[in-house]
Image (cartoon, rainbow, N blue to C red):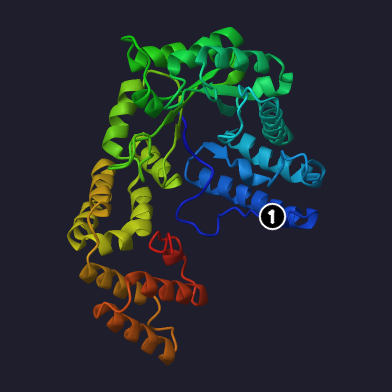
Amino acid sequence: MKIGYACLVAGNQELSLKSCTMKYATPQKLREITEHNLNTLEQILEYNIRNSIYLFRISSDIIPFASKKEVEFSWQELFKEKLEWIGKIAKENQVRLSMHPGQYTVLNSPDPDVVERAVLDLAYHTEFLDLCQMGSECKIILHIGGAYGDKKTAKERFVENYHRLPENIKNRLVIENDDKIYHIEDVMDIALRTGIPVVFDVFHHEINPPDGNRTLLEWLRLVSETWKEKDGIPKIHYSQQLANGKPGAHSETIKLSFFLDFHHMIQQNHVDIMLEVKDKNLSAVKCILATTEQGTMKKLEEEWGRYKYNVLEHSHQIYLEIRSLLKDKSAYPVTMFYSLLEQAMSTPVIDGQQRNALQHVWGYFKDQVTEQEKKKFVQMLEEFDRKMIDAGKVKRYLFRLLEKYPDLYLKNSYYFTGL
């Protein structure tokens, strides 16, 4: 079972993609952006491999405007070798890649122009994976689309348009149930008529279930049967409801206890799990470490090094509890570690604890900085105490010091995430 995440890396500002507006989409600009994005993708794969993440969804924006007819940019020829290299990294490390076109890629629209653009977009995604020389187990996920006032006819239109697609797109395409219109029974109906494999989105199923009394496990078994040997292991999407958010909004992080219950329930099913969550790789690492049979204290200590100052500004008490928990080097208290971590991160930040964290982080610089920089920090801390500035402004100053006085341990911390 592989556990992965989608598109972007959280907690590492260096691993971000670039884009531009159509106005500035010159061939030179697009070449620069694409080169940056592909280099970043390579670094993301290396990060994933180091963290035992072997399932990853590539952002559709990796090549800007690649499916737009009005934009002339021969990315296929310019970056052929780079794409082959990225594919080589993935294949040698058994990383399963996928892509997921956005909401405007609608194959069942009654508007022929919309369908034409959808086919162009599917062709781009297919060509990208083909140029990476990925096998047919690396898929393109698509929602069925809209109902347009007549869901039955819209389903027929999807089937008709699917049969018109080139074979290379068909070999990549999988379909997914959504949270508003097409529940899993609708999607299974289309799958049985077309032979398209189905990605079962568990969260969407909770929000938009079909009538009847089939259990989640029964649906999972039926969905798995739509995957042939050439399609690889069946994939499912897993996410959780954002607390106090509108129904269907994804949570900031995966709550581990809920995930472990789910993981235990489906463990007899051979599936790969794509997490759809806002903190991306952070939740993927959490779920992988919590389900591995070969967990080590070293891994938890590495995680603690990334989170410790975030925890400290939320709860000094939990900070001390986690430090105590990790003292036994022969243990692997992964569930308790993340339970305390989640508890800390859900605790409101208070000024005194933020100040404590700021001073701890300042300790990395205090012996290196100039006298002027030291005075600046002391002044900012006083202004924070008097509520003239917020902690974010002090953090940004510390981050600028980190850029001037690099420290690998602090650089790997999530303390500066979101600045």
Q: Residue at x 42, y 86 (%)?
A: 373
| Quadrant (top left/top right/bottom left/bottom right) for the C terminus | bottom left
Residue 311: horizontal and vertical position, in percent? 28, 59
| Residue 223: percent from left, percent from top | 47, 15
In the rendered image, which quarter contains the N terminus?
top left
127 in relation to 214, above or below: below
Give the left or right position of residue 205, taking residue 344 as reference: right
Q: Where does residue 397 sit, x and y in percent of width and height?
A: 42, 76
Q: Farthest residue to the front: give it.
A: 149
Residue depicted at x 36% and y 83%? 377
- Judged from the image, the secondary structure of the residue bearing numbered disc 1 is helix
| Residue 332 in sight in this render | no
Q: Residue at x 42, y 60 (%)?
A: 417
Residue 144 position by quadrant: top right
Tell me: residue 42, above or below residue 154: below
Give above or below for 20 relative to 232.
below
Mark 1: amino acid: Ile
Residue 151 falls left or right of residue 240 = right
Q: Is residue 303 visible?
A: yes
Circle 1 is placed at which residue position?
33
